[in-house]
Image (cartoon, grey):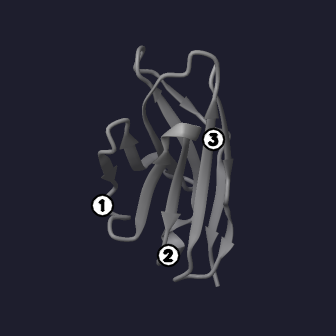
Amino acid sequence: QVQLVESGGGLVQPGGSLRLSCAASGRFLSIAAMGWYRQAPGKEREMVARITITGDTDYAESVKDRFSISRNKARDTSYLQMNSLKPEDTAVYYCYVQNRISGTESLGQGTQVTVSS
């Protein structure tokens, strides 16, 4: 069983920044990748950013050059630095980990990010 604890969401003005954190734990935790999804009201969930065990990263086109994902391997923690936030970034952000052996993904409980003046 994988436990994911997210933090760092909140209310920010357009143009502002937020940093999300996600700490993973669990017996026999073997991570292939960590990342973030988001889901806005009335919209489908979308991948925001992903980082693999080798450090390769991938981003949604809408957040490239504004968001940056990183990982502390020793602590099984990922970070999502979000800069130049826009109202359309408003959503619930979900951390996930992909199991290296099974390939399955485990999702966190979500953290609300609201970008509004």
Image quarter where the N terminus lies is top right
Percent of width and height locating residue 48 = 42, 52
Estimate the spatial distance between the alpha carbons at disc 2 and disc 3, rounded to whole Å.
26 Å
Front residue of 96/61: it is 96
Identify which amino acid the numbered label 3 is placed on.
Answer: Ala
10 Å crowding of disc 2: few (<14), some (14-19), many (20+):
some
Q: Residue at x 31, y 50 (%)?
A: 58
> Label 1 to label 2, Cα distance in Å?
14 Å
Precedes in sequence: disc 1 or disc 2 = 1
Q: Secondary structure at mark 3?
A: strand
Q: Residue at x 56, y 74 (%)?
A: 17
Q: Is residue 47 above or below residue 117?
A: above
Q: Is residue 61 left or right of residue 31?
A: left
Q: Secondary structure at mark 1?
A: loop
- Residue designated by label 2: 86
Q: Position of residue 86 (x, y in %)?
A: 49, 75
Label annotation for residue 23 = 3
**Between discs 2 and 3, the one toward the N terminus:** 3
Residue 61 disc label: 1
Q: Mark 2 belongs to which amino acid? A: Lys
Which residue is found at the position 55% from the left and 56% from the top? 40
Does residue 44 appear in this view?
no
Alpha carbon distance from label 3 to label 1: 25 Å
